[in-house]
Image (tube, rainbow, N blue to C red):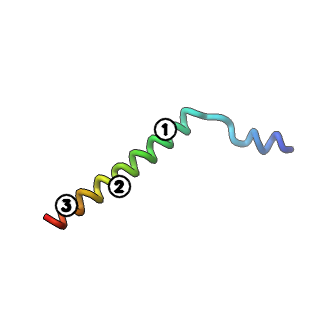
Amino acid sequence: MASEVVDSQPDQPEQAVEGERGALVAVLLMVVLGVAGIFAVSA
């Protein structure tokens, strides 16, 4: 039974890397938009 629970999450490093990359891109976009918004308001 324990082996089935462990096998329920197969190793897929490629998708994991893509997910992390997507999260980093999303965070960077949020930061860039936030900084741009601050400059737009202060300008």
The residue depicted at 29 percent of the width and 52 percent of the height is 32
* Picture coordinates of residue 38, whole percent (x, y): 23, 63
Are discs 1 and 2 less than 8 Å apart at CB? no
**Dot 3 lies on which element?**
helix
Residue most toward the left?
A: 43
Are discs 1 and 3 less than 8 Å apart at CB? no
**Dot 1 lies on which element?**
helix
Report whether 17 appears left or right of 42: right
* Picture coordinates of residue 11, whole percent (x, y): 65, 35
Determine which of the numbered discs, if any, sits on residue 39 in the image.
3
Q: Quadrant of residue 25?
A: top left
The residue depicted at 49 percent of the width and 38 percent of the height is 18
Amino acid under disc 3: Phe
The residue singled out by tag 2 in the image is 30
The residue singled out by tag 1 in the image is 18
Q: Earlier in the sequence, mark 3 or mark 2?
A: 2
Q: Which circle, 3 or 2, is nearer the viewer?
A: 3
